[in-house]
Amino acid sequence: MSGERAMRDWYAPLEIYTLSSWLRAAFIVNLFLLSFDFLRGEGLVLSLLGILMLGLLVNTLPDGSASWRRDVSLLLSGGIIAIGVLSVLSEPIGFVLWMESWLIVPGAISLYWISSPHVSRWNREEMELDRIERGLARNNEYSSSYQRIGKHVILAHFAFIVLLPVLWIIDISLSPGNALGGSFADSFTTEHFSKILNGDQFWIWMTNSLIVSIGTTIAGLALAVPAAYAFSRYKFAGRDQAMFSFLLVQMFPGIIIIVPYFMVMKTLGLLNSHLGLILAYSVTALPLCVWMLKGFFDTVPRELEESALLDGCSRFEIFTRIILPLSLPAIAVTALFSFLAAWNEFLLALTFNTSNDMYTLPVGLASMISATGQSWGDFAAASLLVSLPVVILFVLFQKFLVEGLSAGGVKG
């Protein structure tokens, strides 16, 4: 009997273990969501009350020894659901519904599981030994599945936070007029996309951005690849100081170089030109590109080069026929970084270009929002079109990105 009693005291249903971890996660998320209520200036009292009841529920879950804990947990679960529903009814919009789901769903799951016959029987200490054994086997069988479900639900909710601004921009781009507010997906139109795609300015900006970004990528790789290989393979005077200076320049904000850059470009006659932006972007991105490639070159075994030297290859042949093919993932990552740095840069492009025909896409998009008028619908449509090349590049280079980013962190 003592062994049976010890097993009964030690055993707890999987639902109780799962609720203990899930409710703690919901409590932390609701603390985070409290900042949104504070910014909105609405629902703060209800949210605080819901968080308080979640905390009490975590600490009053049934433990198999006190029957009153089950009754209190059921009351708290019902109260949490009621608070969430009341908040949704007071402001029935999509974002509020998502926020309050962090109260309604945990409360509903708690109410369902705590009131289940299995948990009720365990809480009243009416479980036979064979039922406890089956419960232990059930805990072992389904615990990993419950944990996996909980992780995926939490990650899906956080993914919603990331996707919400994108969904909002899509809604604005497909809504008539230029209002930022309004109900989600209440109307549909493609007038903003038609206006952007049928206009001349957008394609001029797109052409300028493509020329500058591709030129920056080619120039950046032409400078960074041999420089990184030299820093990785050769010992020369000032090597460590040069690498330290590459890191040092990354500490300073880019705005401090605008005036010197502008004076140099003006002296060389490179204002309002593609070449001026390509040179500026290449020099700006060069330090980080060199560091990225050097980290990968350090992982390439030197024995490969030594074997090639014994076979009669020159240093140039070793670099072009052995090192570069092995380094394609790292080069792809560096190329993508250089392209995106030039594609998204705004400050230098605004400073060096004063002609609308030389604007790149970031500067062109900014010109659509002025003090006298805001074309939010056109701006949202253009923003989505500008993002498409970036998304396509990430999809195409996904394999190289994973290989390149992971290879530089592994020695050998």
Image (spheres, rainbow, N blue to C red):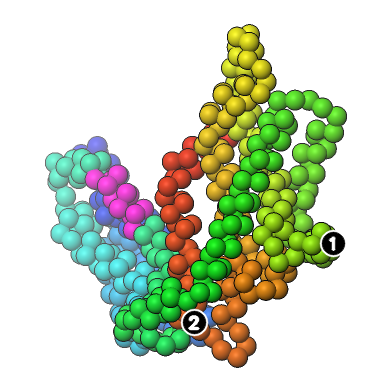
Tag 2's secondary structure?
helix
Dot 1 amino acid type? Thr
- Single out the mark in the foreground, 2 or 1: 1
Residue lying farthest to the top in this orientation: 310
Residue annotated with mark 2: 376
> Which is nearer the N-term, disc 2 or disc 1?
1
Instruction: Read off the magenta span.
Output: 142-154
For the residue pair 147 and 329, the one nearer the viewer reads as 329
**Quadrant in which the C terminus is drawn:** top right
- Disc 2 to disc 1, how far (Cα)? 38 Å
Q: Is residue 45 visible?
A: no
Q: Is residue 186 above or below residue 281?
A: below
- Judge whether residue 29 is colored magenta: no
Question: In which quadrant will I find the N terminus?
Answer: top left
Rate crowding at label 2 as few (under 14), some (14 to 19) or many (20 or more) other CA atoms within 10 Å. Answer: some
Contact, CB < 8 Å: mark 2 with mark 1?
A: no
Q: Residues within 10 Å of mark 1 (few under 14, many from 20)?
A: few
| Residue 103 locus on image (x, y percent) | 35, 71
Q: Residue at x 59, y 44 (%)?
A: 334
Residue 145 lies in the magenta stretch: yes
What kind of residue is marked 2?
Trp
Q: Please identify the quarter of the rendering in which residue 90 is found.
A: bottom left
Q: Identify the residue position indicated by label 1 in the image.
A: 267
Horizontal and vertical percent position of residue 222: 66, 40
In percent of width and height, residue 121 lies at: 17, 56
Residue 179 x, y percent position in the rendering: 45, 87
Q: Which mark is residue 21?
A: none
Identify the residue shown where x is 23% and y is 41%. 141
| Front residue of this view, candidates 230 and 80 | 230
Residue 15 visible in the shown view: yes
Residue at 77% across, 51% down:
249
Position above or below: 237 against 266: above
